[in-house]
Amino acid sequence: MSGYDSAQRLKKDDDLGRWRFASEIASVIRSTPSDWSARIGIFGKWGEGKSTVLHFLEEMLKPEGNIVFYFTPWAVQELDELWEEFGNALLEALETEKLEVELPGKGTIRKLKEKIGSTGIPDLVLGGMELWGKDKLYKGALGFIGKWLKPDGAQVTKIREKLGDSPVIVFIDDLDRATPELLPKLLLSLREILDLPGFTFVLAFDNEIVANGLVTANSAWGDGDSFLDKILDFHYYLPPISKAGKHLLLKNMLDRYAKFVPQESISPIEHLLPDNPRKLKRLIRGLVSLHPQLVRHRADELNWVGIHQTGRLISIRTRSLLRIQSL
């Protein structure tokens, strides 16, 4: 989906050298033995391009025959709901790739959906209730996933047979926006319940926020960074954008969204502008919002340095207003 603040998806749109960064991670995923599992962390601050890296990885890895899907836990409030969302995302990805694995003793996923689709009860929860009974279900979808996806179980074996050496790649974005109480449970599950052969989990988040959230959720976890070290096999930190990358991003954004702004007008204040890509995009939106007023004047009447500063103030004022409204 395109838009002013959308993450980039194609190599041709890479202004900041993130494609090369993503390529390094893709090489690790490709080189991981097919009977191993892996957990990869991509660390970066808000707006620095973590989602763009995930999209680039998808562009690289999906055409190679890998199953790639997103699991976004930030809107989930309860553990049951968390695993229901993950299970549904996994089943949908398998079905999309025509890999309909069977549920134990109940036929294919499609048949089960046809059978219970109109009940209003989430597929995974009801499936677990039918298979093991309410009294034996480990709290809804968590029990279902744990029973269904055993590392040495029939379903994982069938997935591996159908995919061969191709991994199942799960992108978990915006982990830093998840409920702090869920963070340790989710991360521990990646190491324990979902330590599945052929599954690679790529998590994109602000490691400082998550580390602090882990300590907030339970002080017994101690140092949040040490906890993350135990969970993740690889750590990648987004590099700061270069001066040349920042210039190219500004140039292309002006050309794409604000052709009415002279490119040379940016140079005198470029060093004053933020290095965060999302903040730069917000600045451009501020200029776009000024366009109706600017077209009323001749070119020699406009002080572009002052206008750029005004656009920056508009973006800051808008952000502050949104924060107040959300309180």
Image (cartoon, helix red, strand yellow):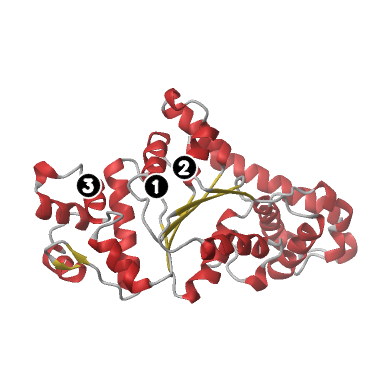
- Residue at image x 38%, y 43%? 186
The reply to whether dot 2 and dot 3 touch (C-beta < 8 Å) is no
Residue type at numbered disc 1: Leu
Of mark 2 and mark 1, the one earlier in the sequence is 1
What residue is shown at x 29% (from left), y 62% (from top)?
Answer: 156
Are circles 2 and 1 on residues that touch, CB within 8 Å? yes
Residue 21 horizontal side relative to residue 133, left or right:
right
Q: Nearer the viewer, mark 2 or mark 3?
A: 2
Q: Earlier in the sequence, mark 2 or mark 3?
A: 3
In the structure shown, which secondary structural element does the residue marked by tag 1 occupy? helix
Q: In the image, what residue type sits under mark 2?
A: Ile
Q: Is residue 161 left or right of residue 315?
A: left
- Decide which of 60, 77 is in the foreground and name it: 60
**Whether residue 327 is visible:** yes
Per the image, label 2 sits on a secondary structure element best described as: helix
Where residue 112 sits: x, y (%)?
15, 66
Give percent across and percent down for residue 16: 71, 61
Q: Secondary structure at mark 3?
A: helix
Cα distance in 3D space between marks 1 and 3: 15 Å
Q: Badge 1 is on which residue?
A: 190
Circle 3 sits on which residue? Answer: 143
The numbered disc on residue 231 is 2
250, 302: nearer the viewer: 250
Does the image show residue 302?
Answer: no
Q: Earlier in the sequence, mark 1 or mark 3?
A: 3
> What's the amino acid at mark 3?
Gly
Q: Which residue is drawn at the image coordinates 76% and 60% (left, top)?
A: 245
